[in-house]
Amino acid sequence: MVTRRTVLQHGGSIALFGSLPSWIPSARGSSGGFTSAPGVTTSGTFADGQSFSFHRAAGGLGARAQPLWLAYYPFEKDLSTHPTLSRTHNTMVPATTNTVISTLNPPKNAPGSVAYIPVPAGGHKASAFSNNGASAQMLCDLHSTGPGFKMYSFQKRRWDFANVPNNDKLFRVWPNPDSVGYPDAYFAYLQSTGEFNGNVGLTNTHAALGVHSNFAPSMPGPVLHTWHTDEFYGQEGTPNHTDGIWNFIRQGVMAYPLAGRWLMSATGRNPPQNTNLFRGAFLDEVTNSPPNGTTDTARTGVTVIDDSWLQLILTDETGGVYHWGQTSTPQAFVSNREAQPQTLRTDTQVSITIRKGSFSSLSGISAYALTGYGSAIYLGVGS
């Protein structure tokens, strides 16, 4: 049984009179290694590291006043944010001497990644950078503006363990610094049940997440010695209302339906709760056993934290179809996606610096402008 929501949008035809701007090659066609969707024109060379622009005369792409990601850690050569494509400028501090940039088993086409040896139940030693909570070292401050605030994250991770990790908390949003550390939210994998589960504490109240409540048994992985691509979507809820969004996507498979909602903060709780959930963003910890604390190595690749759902994604999903949904047979649908750093985003134009990521070639790779949670516009395909 497969339940997916599929969004397919094409640009309409356009009529232009007089001379064409020099950067617009045609209303549709192939340019610079890219075949545009109807109504979309492009400029640049569709190749790794190159600047490339998509223009859609009909609009609808959505504009960003700040096109750069909030925090962009390539995690290939050092522990710092990207010098020019990140709004946040930061260098993470290793939790122990076992957190290093390693050239062993990096993501495809990357020179390296963060490698660390987690210490089971070792507090800050169980993660690459720090423990969670009020004293934690965060990737960035999300600066939530209250109900309706949006968050997106793109991450790569790998487990070179002898056994599948248990109670591995993948990613957490947590107030920081704050002596009252709730609400918080995370996703974890439980080896004992073979399921992922999401949590928003301390409310643990949700609606329309599916028949398994907040557990998600039908998702890809974790597969040992394999790089996984994870995406996270969040939206700040209204206090005392079950209207917040917290969802996890692995290789194109969603944990919960698009209609799923969470209660994120509530008054009258003990301990008291902060109003906003989306404050600090953290790579969390591997706890309990395994890992063995000596040789089991976890790896983290490119990590993006952003305060907008307006993203540009390259993917091997074909036919102009971007998938939003779940599947009861996760390995039957596993896509490869690569988020792209944007340098301009208006309602009619998106400009990016191309990240080839783990694709062997960009031929046959499709481009989509994400315009919201569950909506995307097809821009064309590499040729």
Image (cartoon, grey):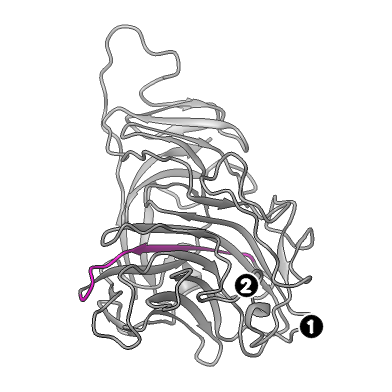
Quadrant (top left/top right/bottom left/bottom right) for the N terminus: bottom left
x 47%, y 74%: residue = 219
Q: Which mark is residue 130?
A: 2
Identify the residue at the far front of this view.
179
Question: Callout 1: few (<14), some (14-19), or many (20+) C-alpha neighbours within 10 Å?
Answer: few
Tell me where the magenta segment starts and ends, as one range. Answer: 227-240
Residue nearer the viewer, 229 or 151: 151
Q: Which mark is residue 169?
A: none
x 79%, y 80%: residue = 295
Number of disc labels? 2
Which of discs 1 and 2 lies nearer the camera? The answer is: 2
Identify the residue at the far bottom of this view.
192
Q: Amino acid at mark 2?
A: Ser
* Residue 347: image location, x then y, percent: 31, 35
- Above or below residue 291? Residue 381 is above
* Residue 109: image location, x then y, percent: 70, 50
* Residue 221: image location, x then y, percent: 55, 75
x 70%, y 53%: residue = 76
Q: Secondary structure at mark 1?
A: loop
* Residue 293: image location, x then y, percent: 74, 84
Residue nearer the viewer, 169 or 145: 145
Question: Do the numbered discs 1 and 2 sit on residues whose CB atoms are within 8 Å?
Answer: no
Please tell me whether residue 37 belongs to the stretch shown in magenta: no
Residue 53 located left or right of residue 64: right
Q: Which mark is residue 294?
A: 1
Q: CA distance from mark 1 to mark 2?
A: 18 Å
- Above or below residue 250? Residue 204 is below
Q: Amino acid at mark 1?
A: Thr
Q: Say which label, 1 or 2, has the lower sequence index.
A: 2
Residue 78 located left or right of residue 354: right
